[in-house]
Structure formats: C-alpha cells, structure tokens
Amino acid sequence: MALLTVENLGIDIHGIRPLDGVSFSVDKGEILGIVGESGSGKSLTALSVIGLLPLIGGRILRGSIRFDGIDLATLPEAEFRRLRGRRIAFITQNPMTSLDPVMRIGAQIDQVSMLHLGLDARAAQARSIEIMAQLRIPEAATIYHHFPHQLSGGMKQRIVIAMALAADPDLIIADEPTTALDVTIQAQIVDLLVELVRERDVALILITHDMGVVAQTCDRVVVLYAGRVAESDAVAAIFERPRHPYTRALIGCIPRDETAHGNLTGIPGAVPSVAHYPAGCRFHPRCPRRGAPCDHIVPVSAAMDGGLFACHFPENSGVAR
Amino acid sequence: MLSYAIKRLLLLLPVFFTISIVIFLIIHMVPGDPVDNLVRIGSTPEQKAVIAARYGLDKPLHEQYVIWLTNLLQGDFGNAIVMRRPVADLIAQNIPYSLALSGCALLFSTILGISVGTLAAMYKDSKLDQVVMGGILLGSTLPSFWLGLLLILLFSVQLGWLPVSGARSWEALILPVLTIGLGGTALVARVTRVAMLETAQKDFVLLLHAKGLPRRRIQLRHVLHHALMPVVTILGLRIGWILGGAVTVEYVFARPGLGTLLIKALSQHDYPVMQGCLLMLAIAVMLGTLVGDLVQAAMDPRIRHSMS
Amino acid sequence: MTAATAPHDHFWLTFRRSLAGKVLLTPKGGVAGAYLLVLVLIALTAPWITPYPFDQQALPLANRPPSLANWLGTDEFGRDVLSRIMYGARTSLSVSVTAISVSVLVGMALGAAAGYFGGMFDRGVTAAVDLSWSFPEILIALILVAIIGPGLHSTMLAIAIAYLAQFTRLTRAQIMGLKGETYIEATLSLGASHGHVVFRHLMPNALAPVIVCGMLATGDAIILEATLGFFGLGAQPPVPSWGAMMSSGSALIFTAPWIIVFPGLAVAITVVMINLFGDALIRALDIRANLREG
Amino acid sequence: MSGGAQNLVELRQLSKRFESRRGLFGKPRAMTAVDDVTLGIPKGRVTGVVGESGCGKSTLARLVLRLLEASSGEVVFDGMPLGQLSGGALRKLRRRMQMVFQDPYSAIDPRYNMADALLEPHRIQGIRLSRADARTVVGELLGMVGLGPQIAASFPHQLSGGQRQRIGIARALALKPDFLVLDEPTASLDVSIQAQIIALLEQLRSELGLTYLFISHDLGLVRYFCDRIVVMYLGRVVEVLPQPHAAPRHHYTRALLDSNFVPDPKRRRTIRRLTGEIPSAFDLPPGCAFAARCPRADATCRAIRPDLTQTADGHAAACHHPL
C-alpha cells in the first residue's frame, strides 16, 4: 500500500472539468514526477491532493485520494487542516511571491511548528534555525530575522522549503519549484530536494513541465495531457520506450547534444484549452499515429510491464498501427 | 523608522513652501489692487498706506512673500477685514470645533469602513456583501449637504431627538459626524473590500493555507494586514476629503469651525481670513499624508528599507 | 438556429456581442441607461415639455406642498418645483458634462505628454498633480470661484480645473503602464515615430479607462455643481439649477421641505444611475475594478 | 573575427550604464548592464548569447538595434555606424534589422487584427499598398510562418501563444530584413510549441539567408540552434565558443553546462553544487565577476579583471585559470 494513492480523480471548477480520471501513487522515499504542458491540469492535481480546490471555487467530482489510510476526498475541512502543513507540505512555484512580505522570515517558518507541533516560540525558533542550516542557508540565525525582500530568489525558495519541512511531513508536493529561478540556482534547488527525499525518507511529488528535470530526478513519472493521464511508468522505462505518442513527442522537444539540426520539430498544433477539449483521445488532433477510433472513442488505460498508458495505437507494445 | 520619519518630514518642506506661495498669490490673482483687497471698502488713503506699508506692498513680490511668511511663522496671520479681528484669533477660536468634527468623522469612517469592508470581503457575493455594496454606492454618491439636511429633517424636525444646529452639546456632533462619516465609510469600505479580495488571490496566501493555518486567522491576520495598507494610503492622501466634507457640513449645520469661517470669508471677500483658513487646511492635509506614510512604513518593511 | 439565420436574429446576436449590448443587457446597465436617456431628453426639450415656465411666479401659491396641480409642490415664489427641476437638469448636465469634457481633454494631453516623454516636464506635472490631488475638489472649486467670481461659467471652469489632476494622473498612469508593453517596443523597432506610437497605440489603448473615469466624474461634478449652487456661488437667479434651488430652500426646511428634498433627490438618483452605468461599462470593457481608487 | 565569414554587425567596446537613485536622499548608483562588449556577428550565421538573469543579454539585444542608446562604444551595421545616423536615417535602416520579442502575449496591440498588425511595418515605413497588394502581402506573410489566411481577421486574444509568436516573426519579416535579433523568442511558450518555433526559425533562415542574434537563458537550446555561442555573466562576455559543442574553458560556462538537465535518466549528473548567488550588478567586484562562485578563484581573480583572450581556433575566454 503506497503512502498516497489517487484513483480516477475528476474535478469541477465553475462547471468546467479540467481533470478527468487521473490516477497515480507515490510512496515514501520516492520521487514522482507529474509532467505536462500548460493547461494539462498538473497544478490542479496538486491543489486537489492538499484539499485547497475550494479556494479557487473547485470541488472533487469523483475518485478517491487515499493518504495513509485516510480518504482525503471526503475528509472534513477541520480535519484536513490539521494534516496540511503537518503531514502533507506544499512548495509553490514562485518564491518571489510566496512569502508574506511584511512578516519576518523566521516567524513564517515558526508558524508551522508552533501550530502543528505545539512548540513554544523559543523552541520553534531553534527548530527553524536548525532546518535553515540543514538547507545550507548561510548565517541562518541572522537570516531568521530578515524580511523576504532582503533575500534572493534562490534563498527565498529555500525558506519555502524550510517551511515545508518544519513539521516533518511525510509527503511534499512541489509545484514547479524551480521554474522561476535562474539555471544555476535551479540546479541547486533540485539537488536539495533530491537530497531531502533520500535523507528524510519522505515522498515527493515533483510537478514540472521539463522532461529534463524529470529524467534527472524522478523515480516514476505521470505524463498528463489535457487533464488526463497519457502514460505513467518508471522513469527509465518512459525515456527508453515511451508508449504514448505524446510522451515520445514531449521528450523529443528538448534538444540534446546529439540532436541533429532540423530534427527538433515540436508537436504540431496547440495545447487545447479546457473549454475546447476534443472528443475521443484529447491528443488525437496533434498525433502522428491517430487512426479511426481516436477522434470519438476515449482510449482506456492499459497496463503493461508496470506502466499504464491510454492510447489506441501505442508505440513499443507490439500493437500494430 | 525614526530616520524614515525625519526624511519624510523634510520632504514636506518644499511642499509647504509651494502651497504657501499659491496661497500668498491668491490675493494678487484677484482682480483689482491688492491693497483694496486688504482693506475695508471706503477706507481712507491713509489707512490704505498703513496696510500697504505693513505688508510691504510697494516692494517686489518675492520680498512681500518673505514678509508675509515671516509674519505667519511668528503667528501673525494679519487682520480680518470684515470681522475686524486678528485672523489668528479667529482660527484659534474655530479650530477646536473642526478638529472635533473631523477627528470623530475620521474615526467613525475608519472603524466602520474597515469592519464593513472586511465582512463584505469575507462573505463575498452573500446577501451581506450585496447590502454593503449598495450602501457603499449610496454613501459615495449622495451629496453631503443634502444628506445633512435630510438627517436634520428626520432626526431633528420629525423625531426631535437631536439638536438642529450649533455646537453646544456633544449631541450636536452626532448628525454632522454621521453626514461626513457615511461618505468616508463608503470610501474606506470599498478600498478595504477590493484590497482584501485582491490579496486573497496572492501566492503567499495560498501557501498560508497550505501550511494549515485556520482560514479566519489567515483572513484577519495576514490578508487584512495587507488590505489595510492601501486603506491607509487612501486615508492619508484623501484626508482632505474628510476636511472638505467638514467645510460643507459645518455650513449646513451652522456649526462654528474652519469651514464656516472659510465660506464666510469667501462670501465677504475677506482675503486674510481666507488665506489663514486655507493654510490651516493645507497643513492638515500635509500632516494627514505624513501620518499615512508613517503608518504605511510601520506596516511594511519594504517601505522602511527603501529609504535607507 | 440553423444555417439560415434570419436577419433579425443576426442583428440581435451582433447587438448582444457589441459593447452597447454588454452594458445595456445587464439589469443595472439597462435601468441606468434608460434613466440617463430620459434625463438627457428632458434636459434637451425642457422649454417645451415643462408643465409651467420655470420662472412663472405666483406669490399667492408660494410654498405649497405637492398636489395634483404642482406634483412636487411650489417654492417660495410660487414657482413649480417639478418644472424647475426639469429645467435644472439642463443646467446641471450641461455644466458638468462641459466641465468634465474640458478636464478630460486637457488632462489627457498633459498626462500623455508627461507619461510618454518623462523627464523634468513629467516631474513638474506629477508634483503639481499630487499636490492638487490631496485637496478635495470642493475646496479647489471654492477657491477658484472666490477668485474669479460666482456664476455658471466660473463654476464650469472651477470644476474643470478641480478634476484636472484626476485625469492627468490617470492618463499618465495608463501611458506609463502601456509604455512597458512589448508592442510599443516592437512598433519602435519597426522605425515608428513618436507620433505613430502615441496616437496609434498608446492613446487608443488608454482611452477606455479615462472615458469611464470621466463618466463617473461627471456624477461627482453634478454634486460639485449642486454644492457650489447651494453656497450661492453657482447659477445665479433666476436660472434654475439643482444646487441653487436647494440654496434658496434651505431656510425653509422646516416649513417647506419639498423645495429642498426633491432637487436633492434628482441629484442623488442621477449620480447613482451614472455610477451604475459606469460600473456596467467597467465590467463590459473588462477594466480593472479598482479604477475608482485612482 | 572568426571563421572567415564576413561580419554583418560589429559591436565595438559597447557599454550601457543605468543610473538610479533610491529615494530623494539616496546616493545615485550606477548599474553597468553591458560592460565593454566587443563582438562580431557573422553574416548568415546564428550567434547565440546565453546567460542568466541580470547578465545584460536583453540590454545587449536592444543596444545592437539601437533601441537603447549606448553609454559608450558603437554598433556598426553593414559598415554603417548606427550611432552616427540621424533619426530619420535610422528609422529607414530599421527595415533591414528587426527583432522578435520574448512575450508574444503583449507583442501585438490588442486592438489590432492580424492583417493590420502585419501591414503596420509597411505603413510605418511609408510604403503604400493597394487593397489587393495588401491582401497578397498578408497572405504571403502568414504562409511564410505556417499560418492560414483565415487568421488575418483574428485579434490577438483569439490566438494561442505559438500563433502569436508566429505573427511576431511575420511582422519582423514583413520588410525583408537581413538581420533578426531574437530575444528569448520561446521562453514563454510550452516546450512542444518552443520546438515548433525553433524549427520555423531554422527553416526561415535557410530560405531567406538571414543572420540571427539569438538571446536565451537555455544553454541546451542555444547549443542546438546556434553556430557560435557567446556566454555573458554580469554584463561581460566571459567566453565565446566558436562551435556550439566546443569544450568550455571558462568555469562559469562549465557550471551552466552542469546545471543543464539532460533528458536522459541514464546520464544523471553527479551532484556538483555551484555555491553562492549571482551578485548584484550594482556593486561589482573589481576582479572577475564570477570569482565569488568559482571553485578555482584565487587572489588574482578577485583583484584583476581577466581579459577576453582568443586562441587560434576563435575560442575566447576571460579567465585567469581556464579549463
């Protein structure tokens, strides 16, 4: 039994349904990548798991989210609140805007341990400074008294990570934690996250649009396209023998050293918006392998060698086109 | 923080001089000989000469200004032409009434406006929110002098609960404060509501939720703090609104005060009194802005640090 | 609705998608639009449609409460209050619309020049605007009227100057914001002149918020006109204006409250309607909701 | 400079300083966004400029087209020093050098439909077109960037990011320029669209014989797309790679390369931390700007600024201890 199992998740936001039948699971000590382009529903998946959909006017329509034996999809808000920040922590995309600008750094980290672990102010401060030091924040005791605007982007993201660690969570969800950062800083933060998972034995869901980040960090991957799971598998398998044409195309969009000129072509067309999802397989208008059933029959998710894919004409599976 | 306050105060000096020049020039912008504007109609040439010498009217304009300003800074605002008393006395006599009225109205608008705006934002789109929005619309559109007259009609004439006019008792303060306060409340409530709703969309609020903080604590401690910053700005900047409201409302309720004095001076063309009143109002506006800035700086470390 | 859409349907569809449709088909926008249309019609045709001439005095009929003959009562000279309110709409509307139009035009020119070219000119304009913005419009108008003397023309001028800061500030802010848009830089990189950038891109895009703000300010200007009139500094007798009517009526509040209640009501309803219409316009144009806080 | 190819554009000791002041009482401070850059942009090739935020790459792009006035130094375009041209002559010359911008969402006036947007370059340059000609021009430009003629009547908000960027490219090509500055043209697009746009740019270059200056923060992309790579750090050129896959000699380029996430789980990089943060461009150290983060930095590096020195193969690096 995995730590978190999401099954057949569907949500509704003001009458539109941006997620449809999303399933995945993640266990302790494991990094699960959820990868997709804009509008794929990857951030909404994160909000569903931490129960913050109502903030943006959304609700869970169907499916279950099982976390350590608790069904989060039906958990009352009062109980969910005690889980949030305590056992499930969240790291947001843009560190520049994720900290309260009028509150000292330290107080923002203290909040978590005081609220969830019942620490007094002194103990919370000691704990916060210790975590900051573990995250290799130089002069943690000084930075503790700083305000957010006095720190760089990379440092702020470390503070956000420190907040996530403050109550010793079991699961961390990081929503594009490096997208807003510079390349060299990105590498620092990603390395830090990987180290955390290995050292603390937590589960990490890493949401990203970057197949490169996935390849370098994740154990398993879920590829989302237009609110549905296209494919999920172990990271090595996904890159070695992608079954869904979208997965292959997405990997092919990132130039490598050996990519020859003219071989980077992208995927034709554009990512559909929620209001204009096509019928059948949502990828079919852009798919090179599409056939007769693709434009009206939704492909059922099939399992093979530990991976799942939803395609009528999968690659690398012996099914003829 | 102290150095910030001193710097802000220093920044006000050029503003003060600009305003004082404008007010000084009023007397020269009015058609006719400035001397005629400073003496009673029918004064003798001797009387005119005395005034002209006193204000240095035969000297170049900039020297006149220096004389005028020096007198001002020594508390000499000149003599009222029609009311025939030192302007300083008139102002000193009237200012407590205006301070009481504006102070109460400001307090009333701030407290009620922030509470109502916060409630409306927390229960957005509810019946309560709709009622508040309607109240805001009315409060910000009804002409204050008319509202004052209606309140007199209702509470003084029909119900007989409160005095019609004057300033003899504290009850006489209620209707004027209400009249000004409604407009002020509407302004504060509108800014508070919009700012709360905007702040609630910010990333850091999402992260506060993700940390598991209770919703109410997030709203009242974090979101409200940010929402109050624009409120303070608006209040500081538009403290003149309250004072401007006071001008008309004092007149409607026949209360003594700077507003009544100013209107009287305007209609009697009593320029020294006019200048004195305007100067006092200008100083009040400047102090309002200063207090607004300081409160802002106290609330937001980014502003405090921006100047050092 | 199949391929053969009737012309009528086509018109309806076009209307619904047009700006006018988006404003007028909301409940608030529709009611406010209808009221304002009627008010403008009354103002235009007042000389021909009022029950009585506005200056017809009948001293024996003075201070009569509302009756079938005089729906809204009569004033201290026995003049019909309803007729005077209808006539007053002419004064109030023309004064405020003219004043605000002048203010918008001058403010846009100043604000655009300051925002686009920056430098010393911008700093001067900004300082003047900030200074005048912190003083209430009523105070500025009072001083101006005191200097240039009472009357309709000075009221207009006073209102125009009192609101100048607001439009200059808004236009400047708009231009400053738009200046950062990539399409401005893109246009410059094509070799465009400043004139092209200002008149083909910046001004057209800055226009909508300024116009809406001008619309809302017209409501405030009506109040300002009424206030000046109330102090006896606006329209001079016998020309009726809503403010002047209340000025003469304020002494009679205990005996003939209708003289003051109804003109005030006319001001209040008109201003509320202008605001409702402005809100509908803001929504239809999808402009920032906090436009009102300047 | 290198490779024998003739330079279409030459930058000579180009610098740009921004003066700023904090508040009324603050001391005026100067930020050097671009510091003494000398560079040739060879005709018909793709020159890439790569660096992180604050390295001055976007400022450089604007200096090259004289959309910003340089503080010192000059830009020579096809033998003409841009700094000496009059306003009118410069505006005329803009036909030959164009720019594609980072943010396609705000690159087109929201009030313009695509036909108007595509015809604006002609209008600005005072080229009058008949109705029929205008329609042909719009059709051709749309076709050139792979869009259908029905797009002509749409407004920006009706188009996707990728479509808008295609329009941005078409506008830049409308006057048949020789030289395009591409300022992170794919940075705000989805990866699948980014690859489309890059493919389009490659195709256009070979068809039209264009010269590109490609600005990016993505070393992987630059290495794929460009013939020659210029690495910038805090306003200075620290390395010029004559071929995209040449081994780096500057430690910063090495770090950038190490920070790249290769999309291959079998080639996981060993965790090698580049410590420290990018310093503020306001108070630059006297020596090598990278010294604070460099594993090889010593006293010399902190005190003396290394010059960009070139070897025979056209490879240049500004480092006291090159790799």
Image: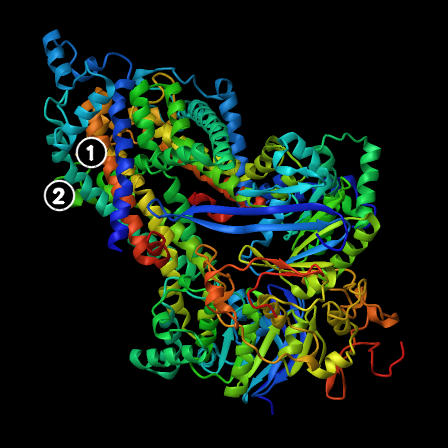
Q: How far across and how far down the image is residue D89, in percent? A: 67, 31
- Which quarter of the figure has residue D232? bottom right
> Which chain letter matches label 2?
B
CA separation, marks 2 and 1? 18 Å
Front-most of D262 and C91? D262
Along the line of sight, the residue nearer the viewer: D313 or D110? D313
Q: Which residue is drawn at 24% across and 35% down?
A: B281
Secondary structure state at the residue bearing disc 1: helix
Chain to which the residue tagged by mark 1 belongs: B
Q: Where is residue C22 in the image (x, y as percent from the top left)?
A: 61, 44
Q: In the rendered view, does A47 fall on the left or right side of A295?
A: left
Position above or below: C227 against A187: above
What percent of the width, then of the height, locates residue D235?
A: 54, 54
Three-letter residue code for mark 1? Leu
**Marker disc for residue B169:** 2
Farthest residue to the right: give it: A320
Tell me which residue sits at (74%, 38%) in the image. Answer: D119
N-terminal of the pair, mark 2 or mark 1, is: 2
**Can residue B36 be seen in this snapshot?**
yes
Instruction: Please name the residue that numbered disc 1 is placed on.
Output: B258
Residue C263: which quarter of the image? top left
**Mark 1 surroundings: few (<14), some (14-19) or many (≥20) residues within 10 A:** many
Image position of B245 with respect to D165: above or below: above
Query: In the picture provided, is B115 more to the left or to the right than A291?
Result: left
Name the amino acid type tagged 2.
Ser
Residue B186 visible in the shown view = no
Discs 2/1, front: 1
For the residues tagged 2 and 1, is the chain the same?
A: yes
Quadrant for the C terminus of chain C in the image? top left
